[in-house]
Image: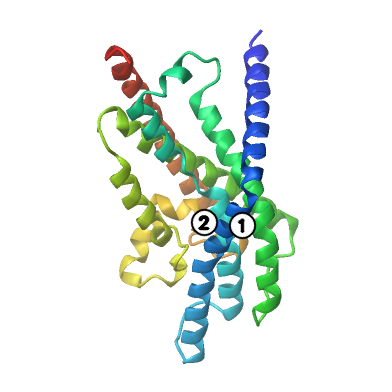
């Protein structure tokens, strides 16, 4: 009996996912331009660091590390990003959340399917662009050859996706109490590329702030999967995955509390 709701949710998720993939594919031209923009920031950062190395700058990484990091971080950032907070806040504010409260499927299931559907198309467009850059960038792209390392990399990406999505639910749910949370969401969107290691690898942060950057949650949304792949996890893999799991639990608890309390106040107000 307990397996029936699970099967039903899986069927609903499959249908919603297929619908979102189809809708996203219609706008594949727009998404191609978006992926070019996604790749631009890491490429500019790579060019800056290559110029710094050529000028004699002393950094604790190799040119090969920089090539691998900046070319692949665009893919990791795309896979682990989430935009649910914006849409969830809008639904709460304008009342369109109401229709989801009477449906058998969860609004969060639809949001996750939307994320996954768009990322499927984005991945198809972004990977060929990255491969072209791999051929053009001098110095090659040193990557691990062991399957175990790639499996750990995939695991880190999966947990990072969950952290990012759950964090978005918590942020979007703030709209239950605040009339406009988009300014807060914009501030987070500006901070995240820096704190997550998209603009600058956290391994290159000044020693004065490296202790903070290694513990803050944004690291585990982008930087940590790259650290796992390139074998540069401070404290080791076990400690790093424990930290990532810890942040996942923290955000899950916060999102659950904020969502449930907000939903009670939303229903009590007669929405």
Is 237 located above or below residue 50 in the figure?
A: above
What's the CA distance linking mark 2 and mark 1? 26 Å
Q: Which mark is residue 129?
A: none
- Closer to the camera in the image, 250 or 10: 10
Q: Position of residue 248 (x, y in %)?
A: 46, 40
- Closer to the camera in the image, 240 or 225: 225
Q: How crowded is mark 2: few (under 14 residues within 10 Å), some or many (20 or more)?
A: many
Give the mark nearer the N terminus: 2 vs 1: 1
Is 40 located above or below residue 235 in the figure?
A: below
Judged left or right of residue 62, residue 84 is: left
Q: Which mark is residue 224?
A: 2
Residue 229 lies in what quarter of the image? Answer: bottom right
Q: Position of residue 3 (x, y in %)?
A: 67, 14
Seen at 64% across and 50% down, the residue is 28
Q: How crowded is mark 1: few (under 14 residues within 10 Å), some or many (20 or more)?
A: some
How many circles with numbers are drawn on the protein? 2
> What SS does tag 1 mark?
helix
Q: Position of residue 6 (x, y in %)?
A: 64, 18
Q: Position of residue 177 (x, y in %)?
A: 25, 29
Seen at 70% across and 62% down, the residue is 128
Judged left or right of residue 159, residue 15 is: right
> What SS does tag 2 mark?
helix
Give the colour scheme shown: rainbow
Which residue was labeled with disc 1? 32
Locate the C terminus by quadrant. top left
Report whether residue 225 is seen. Answer: no
């Amino acid at each position: 009996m307990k397996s029936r709701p699970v099967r039903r949710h899986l069927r609903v998720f499959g249908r919603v996912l297929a619908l979102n993939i189809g809708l996203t594919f219609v706008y594949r031209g727009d998404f191609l331009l978006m992926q070019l923009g996604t790749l631009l920031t890491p490429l500019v950062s790579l060019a800056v660091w290559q110029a710094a190395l050529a000028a004699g700058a002393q950094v604790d990484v190799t040119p090969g590390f920089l090539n691998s990091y900046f070319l692949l971080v665009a893919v990791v950032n795309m896979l682990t990003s989430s935009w649910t907070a914006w849409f969830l806040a809008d639904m709460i504010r304008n009342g369109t959340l109401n229709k989801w409260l009477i449906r058998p499927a969860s609004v969060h299931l639809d949001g996750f399917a939307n994320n996954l559907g768009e990322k499927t198309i984005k991945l198809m467009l972004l990977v060929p662009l990255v491969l072209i850059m791999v051929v053009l960038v001098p110095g090659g792209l040193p990557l691990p050859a062991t399957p175990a390392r790639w499996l750990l990399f995939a695991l880190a990406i999966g947990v990072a996706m969950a952290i990012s999505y759950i964090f978005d639910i918590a942020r979007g749910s703030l709209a239950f109490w605040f009339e406009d949370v988009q300014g807060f969401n914009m501030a987070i969107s500006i901070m995240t590329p820096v704190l997550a290691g998209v603009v600058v690898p956290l391994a290159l942060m000044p020693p004065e702030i490296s202790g903070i950057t290694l513990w803050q949650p944004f690291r585990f949304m982008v930087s940590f999967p790259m650290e796992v792949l390139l074998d540069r996890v401070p404290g080791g893999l076990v400690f790093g995955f424990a930290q990532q799991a810890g942040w996942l639990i923290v955000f899950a608890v916060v999102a659950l509390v904020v969502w449930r309390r907000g939903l009670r106040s939303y229903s009590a107000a007669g929405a």
